[in-house]
Structure formats: C-alpha cells, structure tokens
Amino acid sequence: MTDAEAKELETFMNGLEKRNEYEAEFLQAVEEVATSIMPWYLQHDRYRDAQILERITEPDRIIIFRVTWETDKGEIRANRAWRVQFNHALGPYKGGLRFHPSVNQSILKFLGFEQIFKNSLTGLPMGGAKGGSNFNPKGKSDREVMRFCHSMMTELHRHIGEDIDVPAGDIGVGSREISYLFGQYMRLENRWSGVLTGKGQSFGGSAVRTEATGWGCVYFCERMLNHHSECLSDKRVSVSGSGNVALYAAQKLIEKGAKVITLSDSSGMIYIKDGLSMEQWEDIRDLKEGSRGRLSEYESTGIEYHDGKEPWDIPCDIAMPCATQNEIDREEAEALVKNGVLAVCEGANMPTTVGAIEVFKENYILHAPGKASNAGGVAVSGLEQSQNAMRISWDREEVDSRLQEIMKRIHQRCVDEGQTSNSHVDYIDGSNIGGFKKVAEAMLSYGAV
Ligand code: NDP
C-alpha cells in the first residue's frame, strides 16, 4: 500500500471509529475489508464520488427488542435481541441468528457486514443481515428454548418475510430453534412461506442444508490446494469446534482421505494422532447433536482429551477453524507457520485476528477467509428459498452438485481478483474485491438511496 492509500485508509477508519466507538469486532471486520480493497477502490472515482465505502459500512437499519419468557419454574426472564439489516442491494436480507451470551450489537454488525460480501460471492440474489440474542440455550430445557423462540418471533415477524428478510441458524440456533421460530411465524401470519431457512426437510427444508457449510468449506479447500498443485489426501487437518460447521467439515475431510487430528469445544479439545475414524465421527455427532454432550465425555482408542486447550500449537498441514471469531491470534498463527502449516481454510466467521492475517500473508500461507470458504451454508439456504418459491424439492445429489458448482465459482472469483504476480493467490483480497464490486455496482445503479 502506498503512503497516499494508507492515509486514505486512516482517515476513513478514524471516521468509522468515531461513529462506532465501542464496536471492536465491527471495526475489525471493516478494517480487514477496507485495507484489502483500498488500493483498488481509489482507482475507481465513481465509487469514491458516490461514497460507496461510507454507505456500505452503515447498516440500512438495526432493530433492537426485548424478549420476555418464562422458565420451567415460572420465573420471568428478559433478554435482548437484534436484527441488523445491513444491505439489500442484491436481494432480500439474508443471514443467520446467533444465540450466545456473548452476543452484542458489535458482533452482529461484524457478522452482517461480512454477510454482504459472502452473499454477493455466491452469485445468488441475497442481501446481508445478521441477528440474534444474548440468550444462552445451554442448560435450558426444550420447553424453555421453545418459549424463548416463540417470544422472539412475536416481535421479529413484523420485520421479516420471504421477499424482505430471511433469517437462518448460526451458533446456538440449529434445527430445533428454527422449527420453533418457524411455527410461531406461521401462527402469527396465518400463512406458510419460506421465511426461514434451515427448516426440517418434512416442512420445506433443503437436502444438504445441515452439511452445507462444512462440506462447502472442504470443497473450497480442495480447490485452493489443487490450484496450487497440492491435494487433500493424507493431509493432517486441525479442525476447531464440534458444532454444525466443524462436524460436517470433519465428515467430508475423512471421506476425502484427509486425517482429522483435532476437534474442540469451549471447554477443551481432543487430539487424534492417527486421525478420526468415521465410526468415531458418528459417535461424536450423536454426542453433540443428540445429547448435546461435551467432548470431555467421549472416550475411545487413540483419542486424548486436553482440558482448556485449543488446537493451534499441534503440527498440522491444514488449519480449519470452525468455532467462533478471533480463535487464532498472531502468536497462534506464528506457531502454525513454525510447524509447517500449508493452508488455513476458515469455516467460522473471522476466526483469525488482524495480526494472524498478517503472519499468514507474510509467509505466503494459502488463507481462505470465511466469507469465501464458508459461503456454502448460505448458498444452500439460497437454494432452499428457490425450492420453496417453486414449491419443489431437489434430492441430495442435485443440491450437492449445485453446492460444489457454487464453491467452484467462488474459488474462481477469488483467483480472478486475487491472483498475485508470483502465481500465488491472495484469497483475502480476491474475496473482498470480488464480493464488494457487485454490491458497489448495484448501489451505483440505484442512485443516492
Ligand atoms: P454451533 O453452535 O453448532 O457450534 C459452535 C462450536 O464452536 C461449538 O463446538 C462451540 O463449543 C464452539 N464455540 C463457540 N464459542 C466458542 C468460544 N468462544 N470458544 C471456543 N469454542 C467456542 O455453531 P456453528 O457450527 O453453526 O457455527 C460455527 C461458526 O461458523 C460461527 O463462526 C458461525 O458464524 C460460522 N458459520 C456458520 C454457518 C452455519 O451454517 N451454521 C454458516 C457460515 C458460518 P461449545 O458447544 O462448548 O459452546
């Protein structure tokens, strides 16, 4: 970056910080995108004159509301909930709902902002949004979760619709929560519509939606490796998390002949020196999806549990962070590089800090950012919307082949925009510029709206 470009970036970020003083995660997400696109952005006066960067970093609107619900003992509880409708230049707002005690406006704004570019990269007509609540579903009974979801939808239903805003799941929001939310929406609106994605397959859900983010991440990873004359087979892969994304990434990795050597949850990690077997994977899926258990409870040959540890100081060929934001900081990135990591492929949203990104960049590590590599989930959500609108349902093979095709197109877009002179691809720049361009063009076409 030249001095002039750096100065423009600094001026822009100073203004953003003044307007969003306490929103560290949001500022981090914008800084990553702005740093990456600034040289290109400044070469295009028409975007600059229309203040596209300033406009695209201001959400269309944020809805904040109280969710009051009752515990099984009849005690009253109140949580805060949000829907950040960030940008609908390309289509109805689309993005997940997160239930986690850490949820706040900054985290939802960062996720909604990232979602704009991710959705753009899929090539499907979807705008960017995110929502959620600081409600913690852990330790709650099914009836309590149901009462919370019904209460949340009692407000949320006014702001969403199949052509307005179509939420889906994220951390803490799986098929159980989506079903409760959908049931209440139908009751309030007295009509069936594809207003949420991630629904059960018996009531309008798409085949492969459960697997889509994890599988899509592996499809992307394989393309990235192949493009650089490498392959997945026999590679040692450190996966973090053991939720929806991590589990199905691990399943596809095993199917492709890679060795999954770690999984984790917020209490600790398991290390599997010789790689997880498909039987062990099935046990862990049942433990996590069936009884909502902890990894510490799982015992099997060749599996070591390490309490309070994360996977990043274990030597691996590929790191696949699939748990949450800012899991890999500068020191952990340095440890990965020192141990010979070849590629980092993000299943989670923004799992790497700015410092970690710099380390990977300086060392020419292949680094796929979540907005490209985890776009498979929202892509199949987009396919779910299409199937709902057409009142049809495609079988698993059909959806899987469309998912593979979309991941291939996203990869190609990153290559087209991020190819550097020495035949290395900068996937961060590629995905940011590729995602941004389309939204910017649409915003220009609409004039000053
Ligand atoms: P889940 O709730 O299914 O799983 C989350 C996993 O991450 C759990 O193993 C959880 O452990 C762990 N985790 C959560 N918070 C922390 C933390 N602070 N420290 C350590 N571990 C943590 O969520 P998903 O798998 O759906 O989502 C994971 C990531 O992928 C998120 O960043 C999400 O935004 C992103 N994503 C998800 C998509 C989807 O389709 N689901 C689509 C695109 C991106 P524990 O159970 O102990 O909390």
Image (spheres, grey):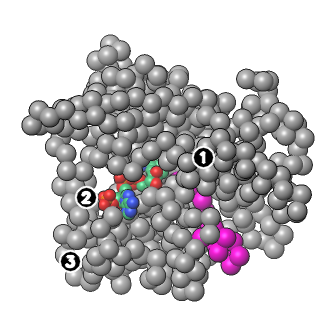
Mark 2 vs mark 1: which is more N-terminal? 1
Q: Secondary structure at mark 3?
A: loop
Q: Position of residue 176 (x, y in %)?
A: 27, 40
Q: Position of residue 268 (x, y in %)?
A: 31, 71
Compared with 259, 186 (above or below) is: above
Q: Position of residue 331 (x, y in %)?
A: 54, 78
Compared with 385, 438 (above or below) is: below
Can residue 123 be seen here? The reply is no
Residue 21 has which mark? Answer: 1
How far apart in space, not on screen, are marks 1 and 3 (Cα)?
48 Å
Residue at 73 percent of width and 50 percent of height: 14
Mark 2 vs mark 3: which is more N-terminal? 2
Can residue 43 be seen here? The reply is yes
Q: Secondary structure at mark 1?
A: loop
Amino acid carrying label 2: it is Lys
In reply to whether residue 363 is colored magenta, the answer given is yes
Residue 288 has which mark? Answer: 2
The stretch in magenta equals: 356-374
Amino acid carrying label 3: it is Ser
Residue 300 has which mark? Answer: 3
**6 vs 200, nearest the viewer:** 6
Quadrant location of the N terminus in the rendered image: bottom right
How far apart in space, not on screen, are marks 2 and 1 (Cα)?
38 Å
How far apart in space, not on screen, are marks 2 and 3 (Cα)?
15 Å
